[in-house]
Image (tube, grey):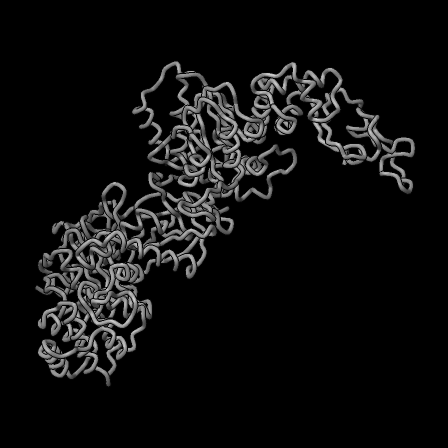
């Protein structure tokens, strides 16, 4: 049955007809080939959704009962298709490319494109279901159909509008591969070498186990595709090959490669598309065993090449693979289970049997070498990336979409400009919604206004691509909902199946957890041990963990990470001073009327897209106001504080300007007061109150020995290290100043302790005069010691020691 496009005068009429046949449709802008709506794969369109002039597409694959489209993208493929594709009753095209779309019903078929390796142009494409999603569904492709208008101005036409043929997915894939192979050969079917080429081609296919009838049909297709007028001569070559193959040598694939001058890439593609890897062949290169059969490892490597897999390495030297899937790429560590599975699936599709584990291992060795020594160096990101002043957030959905945030706002991108990796367990974020507010998070934070501001600040900081990141410390008694709030906050920026983890038992577990996620979240941390505090400090400001690579003596694995972290605890001890200096402590109130998790979850999911959208708006405002944020008076973690202040200056946060630094300063003072829980700190404060101290670490250890407990440093060196850790908090919380210097001719190491608030402040200086020769500015001949810390409190020090101590 044959119809022209005039049978459907409008897309509304066409949509009704297509829906009646069980096919999903999609609205496409006039003169275009791609849908405008980003959610089109999961959206149902009805005839009334179409406007005059719209184009229309049919959604392919499982959404339309297994309907697939063999899209013949070049003239050679169109001419070869009649000889190699199964006949079907549903065919469309345009006047300049008639019958270029052949439709079939092939449940289970997956989308694949066949590219000419030498020119990069598409020969033929099987358009069907795309990549599998995490929920078991598949990514979608669509094909524009009549009465749509092509960008060239031509209308699409139904050449046949009957029933599409029903074909097994594997059989259709094999037929499409042969069309691609015929098109590739037709482009290289040189006029003066055609007879010898036909002999070599027939010999190669004979060796692969093709029947004479199959070879004849394929040669007919090649001749039709190239316009070879001597078809009878080519068929005689096929017949001659099969007659003499019984008792005489025949040529094969290496000879065909030589005659046609095939590049290595074209030869590999042709080899794979014709299925030559499944049968014995005559060959002249490595990768084949003595029986003439090509190794499975070689085939696996060539399958990766034929699929246009990009091999590269990251700055640490680790190998990666970027696999094209539909209209996006999916990035895997080359040694990961996911990439091994993908490689095995490609082999099974080609050979009809699984590859051996050793073959996969050998292939990965080759691919890894190519990635490390021959591939480009590219950074790989998890969830958040920053490039060129823009920030990218991986939504984690099946379409691999990302959000791009710029000073001008944010938008969704269907193709990421950066390379994101999705570790196991990474969950999708909701599509962000505009016009939301961060104030919508307030009902879920059972704490005061100052603490709520710290929570929002942490979320905002978590979308900074480089950090530093304060550690969010959620504290409170049992029943305050610490774990629930931690899960909700993580779900805003980096949802994960694991949610909250148990605390790590060793440092390497901490860094592995950080490398495999964006937000690090630990629940019920009973004790912030020294190594855990130190490790969290490294995560906050950046660092690396090194370990010996398995089965090697010299190679190291370096895990370089900087990550936002949230931990919940009821512990009174708040870790080491360095950790407290990097923490945001939020003490939660007890929930008088707890809400069950299911109800709370529904309420949160209702506003989560709006909260995310508002957070993205705040990040955009931060980028816009970054240069206007004040630099004076910023605390430690200054880059984090400036990041939040910039958003505050832009009016993008739900509180007045200055409120964040006020809340941040108050909680830093509270955390600094925790220093008094340390017996050593208390002893030092008492010593300062008694007039201070000047002496060596050994002398100080002996002086304080009467106050020692089990946590006391056992050696002078350990004491010095502890004092250096305590110094900033003692200065802020108790006004106790600790200095480390050298004195005397022997350059003896000294520790100086003094209560700063007892200093005698010098009076305001008079107008300065020019300093005398040899004098320090601000000093006169009677006071060469200056008026700094050491000179005021230790006048017995020699002048050179005072000058060094005071800088």
Q: Look at the picture and state if 492 lies above or below 249.
A: above
Q: Residue at x 16, y 78 (%)?
A: 249
- Depth check: give the residue in front, 256 or 168: 256
Q: Residue at x 37, y 49 (%)?
A: 333
Q: Look at the picture and state if 78 lies above or below 131.
A: below
- Depth check: give the residue in front, 215 or 463: 215
- Number of on-image labels: 0
Q: Look at the picture and state if 381 lies above or below 276.
A: above
Q: Quadrant of residue 290?
A: bottom left
- Which quarter of the image is occupied by the N terminus? bottom left
Side of 372 where 692 appears, left or right: right
Q: Look at the picture and state if 168 lies above or below 293.
A: above
- Depth check: give the residue in front, 28 or 290: 290
For residue 52, say whether it is visible: yes
Q: Residue at x 41, y 53 (%)?
A: 417
Side of 697 where 606 appears, left or right: left
Residue 745 horizontal/vertical position (percent): 81, 35
Residue 327 horizontal/vertical position (percent): 31, 55
Q: Quadrant of residue 744?
A: top right
Residue 656 horizontal/vertical position (percent): 55, 29
């Amino acid at each position: 049955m044959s119809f022209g496009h005039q049978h459907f005068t409008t897309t509304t009429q066409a949509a009704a007809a297509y829906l009646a046949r069980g096919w999903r449709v999609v609205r496409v802008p006039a003169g275009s080939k791609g849908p405008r709506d980003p959610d089109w794969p999961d959206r149902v369109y009805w005839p009334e959704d179409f406007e005059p002039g719209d184009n229309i597409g049919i959604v392919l694959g499982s959404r339309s009962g297994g309907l697939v489209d063999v899209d013949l993208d070049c003239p050679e493929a169109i001419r070869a298709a009649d000889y190699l594709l199964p006949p079907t009753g549903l065919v469309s095209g345009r006047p300049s490319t008639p019958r270029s779309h052949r439709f079939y019903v092939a449940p289970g078929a997956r989308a694949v494109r066949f590219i000419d390796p030498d020119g990069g142009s598409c020969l033929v494409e099987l358009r069907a279901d795309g990549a599998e999603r995490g929920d078991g569904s598949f990514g979608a492709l669509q094909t524009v159909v009549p009465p749509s208008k092509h960008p060239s101005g031509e209308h699409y036409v139904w050449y046949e509008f009957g029933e599409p043929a029903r074909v097994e997915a594997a059989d259709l894939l094999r037929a499409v591969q042969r069309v691609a192979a015929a098109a590739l050969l037709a482009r290289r079917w040189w006029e003066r070498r055609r007879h010898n080429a036909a002999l070599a081609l027939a010999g190669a296919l004979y060796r692969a186990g093709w029947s004479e009838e199959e070879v004849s049909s394929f040669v007919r297709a090649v001749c039709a595709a190239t316009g070879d007028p001597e078809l009878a001569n080519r068929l005689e070559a096929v017949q001659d090959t099969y007659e003499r193959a019984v008792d005489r040598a025949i040529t094969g694939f290496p000879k065909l490669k030589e005659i046609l001058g095939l590049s290595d890439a074209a030869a590999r593609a042709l080899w794979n598309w014709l299925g030559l890897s499944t049968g014995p062949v005559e060959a002249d290169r490595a990768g084949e065993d003595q029986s003439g059969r090509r190794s499975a490892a070689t085939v696996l490597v060539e399958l990766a090449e034929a699929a246009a897999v990009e091999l590269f390495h990251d700055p640490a030297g680790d190998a990666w693979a970027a696999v094209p899937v539909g209209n996006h790429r999916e990035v895997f560590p080359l040694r990961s289970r996911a990439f091994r599975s993908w490689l095995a699936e490609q082999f099974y599709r080609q050979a009809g049997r699984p590859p051996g584990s050793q073959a996969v291992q050998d292939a990965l060795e080759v691919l890894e070498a190519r990635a490390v020594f021959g591939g480009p160096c590219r950074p790989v990101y998890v969830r958040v990336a920053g490039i060129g002043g823009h920030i990218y957030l991986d939504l984690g959905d099946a379409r691999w979409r990302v959000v791009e945030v710029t000073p001008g706002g944010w938008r969704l991108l269907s193709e990421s400009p950066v390379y994101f990796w999705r570790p196991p367990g990474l969950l999708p974020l909701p599509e962000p919604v505009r016009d939301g507010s961060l104030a919508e998070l307030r009902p879920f934070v059972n704490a005061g206004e100052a603490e709520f501001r710290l929570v929002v600040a942490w979320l905002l900081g978590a979308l900074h691509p480089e950090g530093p990141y304060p550690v969010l410390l959620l504290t409170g008694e049992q029943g305050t909902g610490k774990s629930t709030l931690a899960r909700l906050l993580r779900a805003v920026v980096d949802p994960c199946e694991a949610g909250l983890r148990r605390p790590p038992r060793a440092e390497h577990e901490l860094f592995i957890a950080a490398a495999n996620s964006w937000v690090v979240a630990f629940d019920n941390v009973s004790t912030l041990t020294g190594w855990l505090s130190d490790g969290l400090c490294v995560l906050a400001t950046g660092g690396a963990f090194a370990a010996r690579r398995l089965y090697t003596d010299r190679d190291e694995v370096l895990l370089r990470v900087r990550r936002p972290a949230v931990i919940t605890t009821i512990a009174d001890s708040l870790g080491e001073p360095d950790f407290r200096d990097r923490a945001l402590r939020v003490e939660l109130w007890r929930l008088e009327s707890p809400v069950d998790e299911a109800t709370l979850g529904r309420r949160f999911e209702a506003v989560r897209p709006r909260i995310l959208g508002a957070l993205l708006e705040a990040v955009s405002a931060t980028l816009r106001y970054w240069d206007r944020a004040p630099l004076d008076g910023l605390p430690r973690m200054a880059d984090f504080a400036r990041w939040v202040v910039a958003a505050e200056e832009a009016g993008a946060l739900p509180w007045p300007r200055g409120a964040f630094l006020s809340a941040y300063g108050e909680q830093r003072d509270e955390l600094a007061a925790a220093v008094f829980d340390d017996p050593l700190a208390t002893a030092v404060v008492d010593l300062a109150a008694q007039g201070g101290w000047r002496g060596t670490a050994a002398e100080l250890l002996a002086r304080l020995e009467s106050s020692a407990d089990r946590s006391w440093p056992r050696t002078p060196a350990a004491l010095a290290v502890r004092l250096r850790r305590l110094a900033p908090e003692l200065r802020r919380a108790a006004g106790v100043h600790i200095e480390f210097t050298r004195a005397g001719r022997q350059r003896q190491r000294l520790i100086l302790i003094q209560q700063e608030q007892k200093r005698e402040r010098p009076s305001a200086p008079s107008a300065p005069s020019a300093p005398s020769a040899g004098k320090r500015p601000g000093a006169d001949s009677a006071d060469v010691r200056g008026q700094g810390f050491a000179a005021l409190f230790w006048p017995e020090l020699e002048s050179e020691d005072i000058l060094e101590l005071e800088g």
